[in-house]
Each structure stands twice: as C-alpha cells, then as structure tokens.
Image: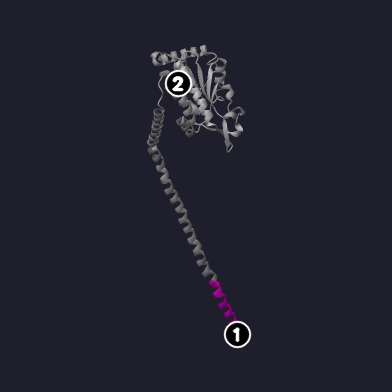
Amino acid sequence: MADIVKELIESGVHFGHRASRWNPKMAPYIYARKNQVHILDIRETVRGLLRAKKYLKQVAEGGSLILFVGTKRQASGIVEREALRSGMSFITERWLGGTLTNFRTIRDRLTRLEELEALRSSDEINSYSKKMQSSLNREYRKMYRNLNGIRSMNRLPECVVVVDPNKERNAIREATKMGIATIALTDTDCDPDIVDLPIPGNDDGLRSIEAIISHLADAVIEGKTGEPVDREAVIAARVAAQIAAAEEAAALAAATVPIVVTEEAPAEEAPAEETTAEEAPAEEATAEEAPAEEAPAEEAPAEEAPAEEAPAEETTAEEAPAEEDK
C-alpha cells in the first residue's frame, strides 16, 4: 500500500484543475485548494484504484473482454501500450458513433478491413488503375486507424476503462445504454456520477495517466494468468524504454549536425564581406576629407595678396602729390 501511495504522489496524480473549472460533484474527493488549484485526496484515489483493480481482476478471470478508451493526445500512446500488454482491445484515435450500440455494423467494417489487407498483400491491387489504388489505400489507412484496436473484440465488452469522462462522453453514454460497467480516471472538472467506478486523479499528466492505467493493466494480467505482476520489473521496463527513446532521439539529432555546419559555412563569410564593405566607406571618407583641408590652404594666399598690394598703391598715391608740391 505504501508503495502505491508513493508512486501515485511522485506521478502527480493528486493535482487537479484550477478552482474556477471545478465540478461541485467532485467536492467529496477534493482535499484542499492551493494557489487557486484543487488538490485531490490521495486516499480517495487509492480507494477508487483498489476497487477498480479488484473488479477488473474478476472480469478477466471470467474470460470477459475489457475495452480501454483514451483518445486525448496525452493518453493515446499509454492506453495503446498497456492494452496491448494486457491483451485487451483499445480505441485511441476516434470513438466511432455506434461502436457499442451498433456493434454489428462495426463488425462488418472490420470484415472490410480484412479484405483490404488481403488485397494490398497480393498482386491483385496492381490490376486497378492508379486512382483506384490511391482510393483503396486511403480507405485502408482510415479504417486501420479507427478500427485496428478493436479487431479482436468479437463481442461486446464487460467493462470500459476511460481516461477523462468529459472527453469520452459518447463512449460512456453508449456503455451505460448497453448496461456495460465503466471505470474512469476523473479530474476535478468531471462529473463522477456518470461513471460506475470513478478514480479521482489528474487526467492530463502523462505520468499520472501512466501510473493509473498500468495498475489497471496489471490487474487484468493477474486475472488472466492468476499470478501477481512484478511492479518493479514493469517500472524498470518502462524506464528502459524511455532511455532507449531518448538515445534514439539523441542519435537522430547527432546525425543532423553535419547538415547544420554546412548551412552555417556561408554565414561565416558574410561578416567578412560586410567588414570590407564597412571599411570602404571609411577610406572614401578619408579621401573626401583631404580636399576639405586643402581648400582653406589655397584660399589663404588669395586673400592675403590683395591685402598687401592695397597699402602699397595708397602709399604711392600719397607720395606723388608730395613731389608735385615741390
């Protein structure tokens, strides 16, 4: 029990939405409010998780089917991985209207998906025109994206596990109409009354979704195999997968480094040209300044010459009358 509580707290499952977005029906599951954010009661989360695990284990022991639903971006990858690990069906792309209430039609579409796969794997598709091949490929991709997760669901499930009841409202509505039990990870902005077994918790954080869904998948595996699941081994495998993904991303980034260097090479020459362009005006400015200094030197003698000659002429003019008087 202590390990579960520690794992849930470290994953941040107790953080809710802002207080302004809360649903008053979630009041019994809220512990406090801090910085305008609601904090969920971890005891209620553990209580709901244990009840859900017990029920899923009983359903798996009876050989019934369980459908995992999580179409929001944060939950799609986690739900798909844990559903595959437990051997159950899942929907992570889009909930098709009538998946449960009109299940016979959905099964017919699965038959069509198998026909398209057989056609693509054979050489018969080459006998069609290019336009028809493109249309068939587009139809296959769309059907595979929406129906691949429920391919093994040959009958209605006994239980539906949902992440965020607000996002998967149609799934919960159809399950309730067909009398199928629902388990949901509900945040402070959800209505817990529309779900049979709510698990109060953060439905937006990757780590919190992963912690809750992995525990539910472990319960399904225990019900099918009759043996307890080693949580440490599961966590170690999850960490190893994350490290491998990080290393792959780092290797991909390192492979693109030479391309970046090649693109930066011309950028290094540009400043050199700019510097030369900046120096050229400086030289021109110096050349322009030279005539400006010489101009006053030429004008100075021109001004002094008339000034010296004028007194000389006046003196001669004064001396001439003196000689005439004599």
Indicate the amino acid at tag 2.
Val
Q: Quadrant of the C terminus?
A: bottom right
Magenta-tinted stretch: 304-325
**Does residue 5 appear in this view?**
yes
Q: Nearer the viewer, mark 1 or mark 2?
A: 2
Residue 171: image tag? none
Q: Position of residue 129 (x, y in %)?
A: 44, 15
Indicate the amino acid at tag 1.
Ala
Which sits earlier in the primary sequence, circle 1 or circle 2?
2
Quadrant in which residue 126 is drawn: top left
Q: Is 248 part of what is drawn in magenta?
A: no
**Closer to us: 100 or 318:** 100
Where disc 2 sits, the SS reads helix
Q: Position of residue 325 (x, y in %)?
A: 61, 86
Residue at 45%, 49% (x, y): give it: 274
Quadrant in which residue 167 is drawn: top right
Residue at 59%, 23% (x, y): give it: 193
**Does residue 135 appear in this view?**
no
Q: Is residue 301 above or below residue 149?
A: below
Protein image colouring? one colour
Task: Characterize the local packing of mark 2: few (<14), some (14-19) or many (20 or more) Cα atoms within 10 angstroms.
Answer: many
Residue 322: image tag? 1
User: Residue placed farthest to the bottom in the image?
Assistant: 326
**Closer to us: 68 or 12:** 12
Residue at 39%, 16% (x, y): give it: 121
Q: Which residue is mark 2?
A: 220
Q: CA distance from mark 1 to mark 2?
A: 142 Å
Dominant SS type (magenta): helix
User: Residue placed farthest to the front in the image?
Assistant: 1
Q: Position of residue 155 (x, y in %)?
A: 48, 13
